Amino acid sequence: MDKAAPPPKSPPLPPPHETALHQDDATDEDENVKQLGDCSAVYLSLQDCLINSNRDWKSCQKEVQALKACNERRNNSKKK
């Protein structure tokens, strides 16, 4: 006679120190965004679009092009 398999166990929760690492990653990302200067707002709007569209880059082309143009202006101003 076959016995029913026991239900799968839930994965264990991560230790508290691992959660802190993810918080540090968020802080590092904030610093990287700040380095974009004037383009940081455009970058964040692109991120919002990607989140809202389930990472559909095609639906966020307006934001992609805006970020590209902002970076080109930024790079051209650095060359002067």
Image (cartoon, rainbow, N blue to C red):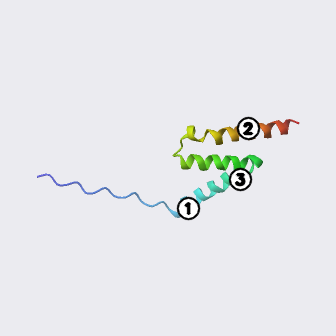
**Residue marked by disc 3:** 31
Residue at left offset 11%, top offset 52% = 1
Q: Mark 1: which secondary structure?
A: helix
Q: Which mark is residue 47?
A: none
Instruction: State which tag comes first along the sequence, 3 or 2.
Output: 3
Q: Amino acid at mark 3?
A: Glu
Q: Quadrant of the C terminus?
A: top right
Residue 77, percent across and down?
84, 39
How many neighbours does mark 3 have within 10 angstroms: few (below 14), some (14-19), or many (20 or more)?
few
| Mark whose residue sits in front, 3 or 1 | 3
Q: CA distance from mark 3 to mark 2?
A: 22 Å
In-front residue for pair 57/33: 57
Quick one: SS at disc 3?
helix
Taking 4 as reference, is 14 left or right? right
Question: How far across and how far down the image is residue 32, in percent?
Answer: 70, 49
Q: Which mark is residue 17?
A: 1
Which amino acid, by three-letter code, is at mark 1? His
Closest to the observer, 14 or 48: 48
Q: Picture coordinates of residue 37 (x, y %)?
A: 77, 49
Residue 10, picture quadrant: bottom left
The vertical placement of 70 against 5, above or below, is above
Does the residue at mark 3 contact the one at mark 1 (Cβ under 8 Å)?
no
User: Which mark identifies residue 69?
Assistant: 2
Quadrant of residue 20 in the image? bottom right
Disc nearest the viewer among 3 and 2: 2
Q: Amino acid at mark 2?
A: Ala
Other residues around mark 2 within 10 Å, as few (<14) / some (14–19) / many (≥20): some
List x then y, in percent, for residue 46.
Answer: 63, 46
Q: Secondary structure at mark 2?
A: helix
What residue is shown at x 71% (from left), y 50% (from top)?
41
Work out whether 2 lies above or below 63: below
Foreground residue, 21 or 46? 46
